[in-house]
């Protein structure tokens, strides 16, 4: 919904750059042309200001980068150029507009505000000086007609220099977990190695075919011959041992236990906690799940491609007596070859039906293995959001029939209700499942309903405690230095791409607070490994309930404050669960002081 405004601003910025070049060209020439171009340029900058004010309606964070640095850099010199249109003011005005546009396309984080402002102002002052000198040379009759152009070009040098030094420096030093001196290695932070496991499982990754309900076959990657892989059911407190075997997946495989706070060495991140398991190799994971709930596992090597092709499955941790009723795990998945954004419920790429006796308890565990948030419709019953990301919601009350909810990429919702006599439909895009007592009802056509908001759901929010460390993260679209060179992506964290994104460093026992603000035009599901996080507020509104998550969808203009306790030492991934964004560098690490990783990323960021 903010996309048109962002695009308008980009177009205006480009037009302003062109006008600024014309203004610079006529700075020393015909005064009437100079005045005309000064007014045109100023009008374009004013239009950008108007667009920025419209962006404010979506929240301060969407407009802040424009209002705090970019536009003042253009507005102040342009006001001068219009007020006193002579050579120097025209040069400085034109340069201010170019710099302003530069910072639109190359966003920066809060850590860079001071150097960027100081560097830009210094550049403008140098240029003003050059322009004055140029005037003297001209009066003295020297052949310096080309100097205005040289001067404009010269201006870009400090700007480019700033970005290069900022980004390239952190590119060299940001990926610093190997350099941390002494202390413990990730390899020492394993699950119990000396006890006999309570459960022993094997996951064998291999190439294979998956047949969807429509009859379409997918050239897939499977665990134990199927995708989704086997649903693993273990009990809270059990020591689980899983042996991963890679038969023939060339990219390599690992298993990440999404949402389970396993010891660091069991986390399944190639290049950080282990090496990817090559064809013919195996790797043993051991951990003891300490919370019951809906989790999932997936490969973390080449995740964008390999998860989509099928290397994922459900991990259900149980506690207490078995659920009495109808229970089913449903992945929303986007199979390769499907139409853009067409999701299936597991392998059901067309509407499906299910018989459930009226009066039975129903528990649906919905897991989103796609890269986008999925809007899930439920029609035919009131229902309760019993758990989010494997965390039971205290004080959960039923929501109205027809309510929709948004499942973040990587996120899980446990939906509970009592089966009525009439059919119930659960749908996401074209995927639809109808539950009915005789199993014959077809899914109903569901229109968008009101959207469930976890922020105001449930009860038990404790008043926010203090924090030992705070971090401020801005998510942006723009140019950055990544694997593919200097490219335009929607994956910037504080103006950086992996590996230049600085690592968040904490000490064991710290209470950590993170502010995540999105100035991007797309959703970013923020996922921290090894820790569940508590949502304190969104856009300044505190959470009413005890909302814990491991995958938080941060939509354009949203600002979340989240908190967690640093109670699981290691070097952890902290990334966008839109795997494409991850592959483009929207990845950072959370590292504990004194812990280092002997592995190195031989591949991409994921
Ligand atoms: Cu579900 Cu790092 O991922
Ligand atoms: Cu993202």
Image (tube, rainbow, N blue to C red):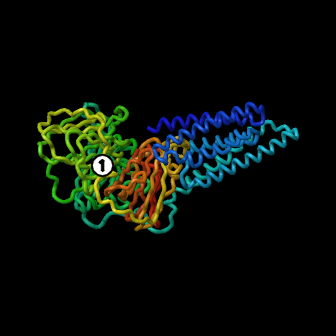
Residue 518 screen position, x and y as percent: 46, 47
- Is residue 204 or residue 489 the one in the foreground? 489
Dot 1: within a 10 Å radius of its alpha carbon, few (fewer than 14), some, or many (20 or more) residues?
many
- Is residue 20 or residue 568 the one in the foreground? 20
Residue 10 in sight in this render: yes
Determine the residue located farthest toward the right in the rendered image.
140
**In the rendered image, which quarter contains the N terminus?**
top left
Residue visible at 44% across and 54% down? Answer: 271
127 up-or-down from 188: above or below: above
Quadrant assignment, res 431: top left
Q: Is mark 1 within 8 Å of ligand 1?
A: no
Label 1 SS: strand
- Is residue 178 or residue 519 the one in the foreground? 519
Residue visible at 12% across and 43% down? Answer: 358
Residue 139 screen position, x and y as percent: 86, 40
Left or right relative to 467: residue 159: right
Left or right relative to 282: residue 486: right
Identify residue for label 1.
412
- Numbered label tally: 1
- Is residue 117 or residue 184 the one in the foreground? 117
Residue 281 screen position, x and y as percent: 35, 51
Left or right relative to 453: residue 397: left
Residue 227 in sight in this render: no
Residue 428 screen position, x and y as percent: 29, 38
Residue visible at 81% across and 41% down? Answer: 135
């Amino acid at each position: 919904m903010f996309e048109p405004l962002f695009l308008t601003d980009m177009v205006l910025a480009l037009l302003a750059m062109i006008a600024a070049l014309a203004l610079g060209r006529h700075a020393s020439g015909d005064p009437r042309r100079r005045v005309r171009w000064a007014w045109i340029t100023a009008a374009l900058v004013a239009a950008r200001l108007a667009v920025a004010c419209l962006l404010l309606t979506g929240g301060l964070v969407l407009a802040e980068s424009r209002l705090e640095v970019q536009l003042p850099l253009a507005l102040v010199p342009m006001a001068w150029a219009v007020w006193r249109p002579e050579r120097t003011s025209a040069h400085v005005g034109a340069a201010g507009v170019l710099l302003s546009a530069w910072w639109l396309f190359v966003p920066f984080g809060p850590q860079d505000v001071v150097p960027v402002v100081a560097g830009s102002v210094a550049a403008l002052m140098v240029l003003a000086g050059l322009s004055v000198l140029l005037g003297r040379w001209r009066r003295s009759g020297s052949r310096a007609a080309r100097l205005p152009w040289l001067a404009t070009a010269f201006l870009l040098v400090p700007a480019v220099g700033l970005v290069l030094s900022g980004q390239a420096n952190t590119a060299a030093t940001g990926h610093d977990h190997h350099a941390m001196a002494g202390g413990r290695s990730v390899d020492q932070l394993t699950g119990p190695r000396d006890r006999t496991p309570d459960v022993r499982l094997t996951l064998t990754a291999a190439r294979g075919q998956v047949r969807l309900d429509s009859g379409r076959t997918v050239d897939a990657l499977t665990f134990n011959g199927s995708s989704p892989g086997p649903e693993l059911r273990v009990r809270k407190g059990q020591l689980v041992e899983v042996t991963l075997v890679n038969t023939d997946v060339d990219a390599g495989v690992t298993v990440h236990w999404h949402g389970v706070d396993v010891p660091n060495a069991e986390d399944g991140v190639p290049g950080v906690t282990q090496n990817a398991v090559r064809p013919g190799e195996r790797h043993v994971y051991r951990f003891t799940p300490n919370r019951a709930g809906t989790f999932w596992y997936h490969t973390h090597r080449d995740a964008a491609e390999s998860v989509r092709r099928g290397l994922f499955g459900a991990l259900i941790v149980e506690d207490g007596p078995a659920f009495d009723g109808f229970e089913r795990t449903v992945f929303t998945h986007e199979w390769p070859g499907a139409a853009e954004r067409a999701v299936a419920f597991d392998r059901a790429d067309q509407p499906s039906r299910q018989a459930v006796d009226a009066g039975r308890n129903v528990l649906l565990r919905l897991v989103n293995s796609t890269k986008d948030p999925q809007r899930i419709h439920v029609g035919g019953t009131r229902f309760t959001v019993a758990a989010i990301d494997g965390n039971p919601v205290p004080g959960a009350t039923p929501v109205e029939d027809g309510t929709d909810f948004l499942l973040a990429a990587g996120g899980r919702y446990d939906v509970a209700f009592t089966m009525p006599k009439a059919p119930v439909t659960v749908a996401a895009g074209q995927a639809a499942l109808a539950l009915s007592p005789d199993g014959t009802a077809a899914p109903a056509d569901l229109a968008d309903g009101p959207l469930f908001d976890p922020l105001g759901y449930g009860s038990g929010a404790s008043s926010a405690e203090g924090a030992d460390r705070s971090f401020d993260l801005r998510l942006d679209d723009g140019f950055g230095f990544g694997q593919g060179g200097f490219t335009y992506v929607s994956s910037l964290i504080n103006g950086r791409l992996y590996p230049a994104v600085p690592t968040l460093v904490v000490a064991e026992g710290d209470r950590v607070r993170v502010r995540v603000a999105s100035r991007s035009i797309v959703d970013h599901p923020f996922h921290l490994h090894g820790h569940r996080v508590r949502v304190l507020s969104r856009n300044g509104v505190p959470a009413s309930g005890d909302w814990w998550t491991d995958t938080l969808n941060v939509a354009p203009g949203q600002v979340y404050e989240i908190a967690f306790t640093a109670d699981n030492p290691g070097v952890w991934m902290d990334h966008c669960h839109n795997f494409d964004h991850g592959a483009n560098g929207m990845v950072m690490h959370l590292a504990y002081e004194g812990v280092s990783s002997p592995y190195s990323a031989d591949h991409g960021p994921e």
